[in-house]
Amino acid sequence: MNPATAAPPTARSDTRTQTSVTCPFCSLLCDDLEVTNRGGSLGVSAGDCARARAGFEREYTVQPPQIGGRSVSLEEAVAAAVRLLRGARHPLYGGLGTDVAGMRGLLALADKTGGIVDHMLGDSMYRNILAMQDRGWILTTMTEVRNRADVVVFANLDAVSDHPRFFERNIWNADSMFGLPTKSRQVVYLGEGLNTRPGISPDGRKPLHLKNEPERLGELIGALRALLAGQSLQAEAVAGVRVSALMKLLGIMKGAKYGVIIWSPPRLPFASADLIVEAICDLVKELNAQTRFSGFALGGNEGILTAGAVCAWQSGYQLRTDFGAGFPEFDPTRNATARLLENDDVDLLMWTATFLAGHTPPATRAPTILLAPPLPSVDSRCAVYIPVGTPGVDHRGQMCRVDNVVSLPLHQVRESALPSVAGVCDLLLQSL
Amino acid sequence: MLTRLKGGTVYDPMHGVNGEVRDIHVRDGRVVSSPPAGQRIDEEYDLHGKVVMAGAIDPHSHIGGGKVNIARTLLPEDHRPYPVPRTALTRSGTGRAAPSTMTTGYRYAEMGYTAVFEPAMLPANSRQAHMEMADIPIIDKGAYVMLGSDDYLLRMMAAGKTQEEINDYIAYTIVAAQALAVKVVNPGGISAFKFNQRNLDLDEKNSYYGVTPRQILQTLARGVKELGIPHPLHVHGCNLGVPGNMQTTLDTMSGVEGLPVHLTHIQFHSYGTEGDRRFSSGAAQIAEAINRHGHVSADVGQIMFGQTVTASGDNMAQFRNRGIATPNKWVCMDIECDAGCGVVPFRYRDQNFVNALQWAIGLEIFLLVQDPWRVFLTTDHPNGAPFTAYPHLIRLLMDKGFRDASLERLHPEAQAMSTLKSIQREYSLYEIAIMTRAAPSRSLGLSDLGHLGEGAAADITVYTPQDDKERMFERPDYVFKGGTLVARNGRIVKVTDGATHTLRPGFDKAAVKPLREYFDRYHTMRLENFRVSDEEIVNEGRGHVVVNQLRDGSRG
Ligand code: SF4
Ligand SMILES: [Zn+2]
């Protein structure tokens, strides 16, 4: 795909190393990896990240497709899937862990069959989308954080649990562009129970840590907004944090030249968490009356931002869009996977999950078509299983990064007999 | 296969053809010379009494890229009332101000447009812009890459790098981002906003780099000229929307030392401060200056009344405008030490003094600029209005009675402040063909598009002449794209894939090394992954890349 990157190895017995490989296994899409291919099994020899290793080093086997647990040819599996899709009145295209081309294919199917699209992490994504659609926001991107941020507030997250290299790449990077010594960045954590060790600067400076009760983050942000507006608070503590500590934090935030507050929707697993996101975004807007401050949303793993972006440009709406009426209709509450399956509002589930292992389809009364990389065992209740490759491993592709601005090319790092999601969708579309 | 379009009344300004009855022959997607008598004609369209023009070209329309997708996501209410059902032929979609990609392609083609250019592709976002445009069917497309607030350029300027070195960087960026032209938005201002500057006038310094917008304009305009980029530097100037910004715009025209520049959505930059409300039309002065400066072209960015969304790289201006967001929600972003963006939904109201005057100012500029080769028809979609307003806009330009009647419905003080009523001019079909075909084609250097001469791409639009020009231009009888009939009576009859137009200016390979080091040190992406390859655009054969010619005499 890219002239500067070595072509994929041609013989299985080769040992080949590719550089500047993009990692699709979290939404940071680090593209500085070195991947060594020894006869089809892969080693990640740069970018010390357990998550990336788990992804690239997932065992590669060639497995035949299955119908109800029975091995069949690809043609038979496609024919069976086509029969199911034809017979379905209202299919759900779930999972959606794939690349741009795969998502294009799945959307073409959804449009043609009158289906619904939702991602496996849809619940968490909607904490952001609802807030954005209600109020809007001010956001920044990774390279800005890396070079510009002098104050970085982590709201209820440690960042590294879901994005192992976040600090390495964006906080304790060696060089920055505007004369800011990165090790002097002020790191702040909000929330108890976080791994704050990565927040210790290279010269040993400890981060500020306010140990609020995580589910009460919204109250804490509300208190900061009140203090910023010049109001005084009656309480001595908010969400378990003393008001004096909040005043100190607010001073740090107001004093930032370019502050950033980071949250992650999967790390806000609370009812009405969209209101917490809204409060954070309103605080950011208000800080910009005087200084520059931006929000930054982490999360977005398993291809959800790619799926959402492609859905938005092709349909006008984010995920949880229903094509059943012959045109797209958007309803983030009604079109949530769990609700649809529970109420039997859909009569077929086509589940796609090509990145990290473990994202198996939810149990459902509806027959299931599964597109996933080779699995040690496939649930025999799965009506049709078609093994597919992982974009960025078995075939090239494109994905959107966590900041929703940058997208990266994915490279093929081994020769693979596995079809891509896009390829399978093409076969299905041709027969439908 | 040889097709004859027989007996239509042809308007082809590139060849001086002004309403002549002619046959046009098409073979293999191209216009060909008249075949010898007796040659078999495979297919014939009788176009007697019809008006024939090349397919229209929109040189400035925000059709793809991050900020458009932000606008789509932000505004489900823009889409709900405008569902587009799927048909056996076409995909479903939605939307009006920020329509879905397939819908964008269909609507443009149905209106007789066959090439549309996205004017604000951030280098950091170029891959996504191309991915979105790949899903816009039928029409050709291309994009202008945004420079001027990118830290690499500003660092080069602050360090006193030579024009030659800067040209290498511009050329590299055009190639890597697969662009057709270069745009500058609020020169240096998007960067200045990141350093907490809230305004930046033409000669005001960026507080970190000490570089002024005027210096950036001159450097980029000179680079574009020296590299042989056909389209002049595409300039979204300083102080967008600010009363009194007319003076900045006049200074910009005279301040580029005679270098060619294209001033985009100039309506938003043509405001005076006269009258009780300190807001007045600068159209007369701006048009006079355009008439006088042969090196300047402009597109208007006409506003139309109703709901739309403004999407711009100018986050400094958009942040300033946040208070007018309707509905009350907006997005601003700082982007990748490269650029920014701001998305603010807005409703232009005819009973609002400022909006009514904006409408009049746009039309005044259209009518007072004498040379239709230097003023292009745009609404800055969706910033002034959705592109679907073009037929209405054409009627306003061609029909004084309709125009005057429209003016009479507006805010009375705005009427009183406008000279529109005193302007007699009505555009002719020939002039419309210039401003929507020949002029953008020539300005962008698209040698095959925008005309009907031998060898031209057979992108052809056929209309039935009508007194109501809005109806005439809304629904052409036939639209051919590359010789294929794609729309008939305003309905899509075939879906094809258009080309992506690019340029390949040359650059010194030695210039890549410092850029790679810069990426490795400061960026979050490798230089080789930044570069968008042809294969990504071609995308399993769905599209293709056209490399356009540089101007003669340039390196390349
Ligand atoms: S941080 Fe994320 S993208 Fe980077 S190497 Fe690890 S898993 Fe891959
Ligand atoms: Zn524009």
Image (cartoon, coloured by chain):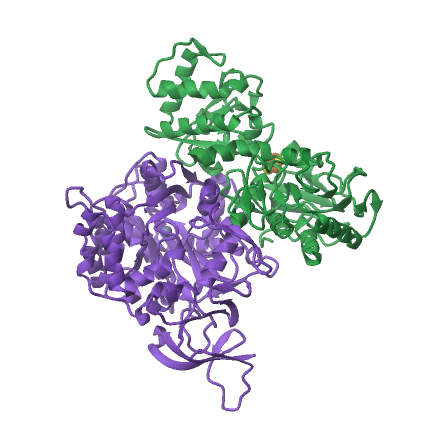
Chain colours: A green, B purple
Looking at the picture, tell me which residue is in the foreground, B464 or B547. B464
Q: Is residue A90 above or below residue A200?
A: below
From the top left corner, tell me how far across and down residue A161 is, in percent: 60, 27
Q: Quadrant of residue B114?
A: bottom left
From the top left corner, tell me how far across and down residue A172 is, in percent: 51, 29
Residue placed farthest to the bottom in the image? B38
Residue drawn at (54%, 44%), measured in percent from left and top? A329
Q: Quadrant of the C terminus of chain A?
A: bottom right
Q: Is residue B1 above or below residue A402?
A: below
Can see residue A353?
no
Q: Quadrant of residue B462?
A: bottom left
Is B191 placed left or right of A33 in the picture?
left
Can see residue B432?
yes
Looking at the picture, tell me which residue is in the foreground, B315 or B486. B486
Residue drawn at (53%, 38%), measured in percent from left and top? A402
Residue placed farthest to the left in the image? B275
Looking at the picture, tell me which residue is in the foreground, B127 or A274. A274
Q: Is residue A238 above or below residue B287?
A: above
Is B534 placed left or right of B75 in the picture?
right
Q: Is residue B105 above or below residue A211?
A: below
From the top left corner, tell me how far across and down residue A125 is, in percent: 55, 34
